[in-house]
Amino acid sequence: MKRLNKNDEFIDVTNIYKSIFFADQERIHKYAIINKDGAVYHPDPKRKKIYQWEQSCLYEAKILQKKTKPLSLEYCRKYLNKIIKHEWRLLWRRNSEDAKASLYYGQHSRLIPKLTFNEILPLWKKGWRIHAHASWKIYRKKGEKRTLILDTKLFKKGSPRFTRFHRKINNEHLKKYVEGGHYDEDVNLYDYIDAKMHGKNRIKITYVPNYCVMRLHEKARTKQTMLHELAHLLNTEFQAHNSSFLTILMYLFHKYLKMDYNMMYYSAVFSKLEIDEKHGFFESKKVTDKGMVDWLRFDKKIKN
Ligand SMILES: [Zn+2]
């Protein structure tokens, strides 16, 4: 396993986790493109066009013109985690298929046995090249452990892996179950490291949390860049700047930067960029004829 410098508090466990992730054939066949080299990402032909659309919308909304100091990493960490937590759940309620297809769910959630997501950890290190990148690495913090107190019911039904607990749930059986997990080098591949009875109907789980590392150069520590990266986490796995990405980004820009939805929608239409109108985050009610007229008039004003 690749380690960081001796004094670094985080350990890179990406390779171990990615190998499990890539072993998930069902997800690969659903979301990736299969060719002779195996599973590959979908082509990303609209990347530059989406960047242009994004820049012009940010300019139109007078966001680009503002000179702001880079946000602190601590601020970014809070901002990113608050939004992903809230928006993933909201997407689940609006369209659970979209939520289940998301990169964040596919690569950064675990059943312990409660659905638990990796916290986003914004980081920057010298030598990294791309200024902003979601889901770059999976890290663990040295010696960190967390606990969950769960109802025994969760062990009886739900995930098929717990069917072995049809017998009595007690400390002895829980211990055997935890010890049945296997290790790859010093990383426990099992979802948790300890499980004990906690009162009569509860189980206390101890597990090691993982972090979803987001590369964030100082220049990228702005709300608009973080929202762009969050849109990647909420978008389908194995896809980059496609129609659902654009739909999610429009939704986030409107909600968190108060950008005009019609302006973004019609700018995309006129740039011949496809919007996924079936996506859970498409705000059909916000697209209006009046909105388009208002935006075009606004455009005329600038020309005069
Ligand atoms: Zn991007």
Image: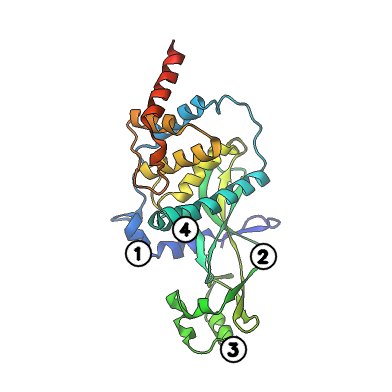
The residues bearing labels 2 and 1 have C-alpha atoms spaced at a distance of 32 Å
Label for residue 144? 2
- Whether residue 130 is visible here, answered yes or no, is no
In this rendering, the label closer to the viewer, 2 or 4: 4
Q: Amino acid at mark 4?
A: Tyr
In this rendering, the label closer to the viewer, 2 or 3: 3
Q: Which residue is mark 4?
A: 105
Is 279 left, or right, of 134 in this rendering?
left
Q: Quadrant of residue 290?
A: top left
Vertical relation: 207 (above or below) 7: below
The residues bearing labels 2 and 3 have C-alpha atoms spaced at a distance of 25 Å
Vertical relation: 264 (above or below) 174: above
Is 297 left, or right, of 62 in this rendering?
left
- Whether residue 218 is visible here, answered yes or no, is yes
Q: Amino acid at mark 3?
A: Glu
The residues bearing labels 4 and 1 have C-alpha atoms spaced at a distance of 14 Å
Q: Amino acid at mark 1?
A: Glu
Q: Residue at x 49, y 25 (%)?
A: 60
Q: Which residue is mark 3?
A: 172
Q: Which residue is mark 1?
A: 26
Q: Amino acid at mark 2?
A: Glu
Vertical relation: 231 (above or below) 180: above
The residues bearing labels 3 and 4 have C-alpha atoms spaced at a distance of 32 Å
- Rendering coords of residue 193 (x, y %): 60, 74
Residues tagged 4 and 1 counted as in contact (Cβ below 8 A): no
Q: Quadrant of residue 300?
A: top left
* Colouring scheme applied when the structure was drawn: rainbow
Label for residue 207? none
Work out which residue is located at the far left of the displayed protein and give it. Answer: 36
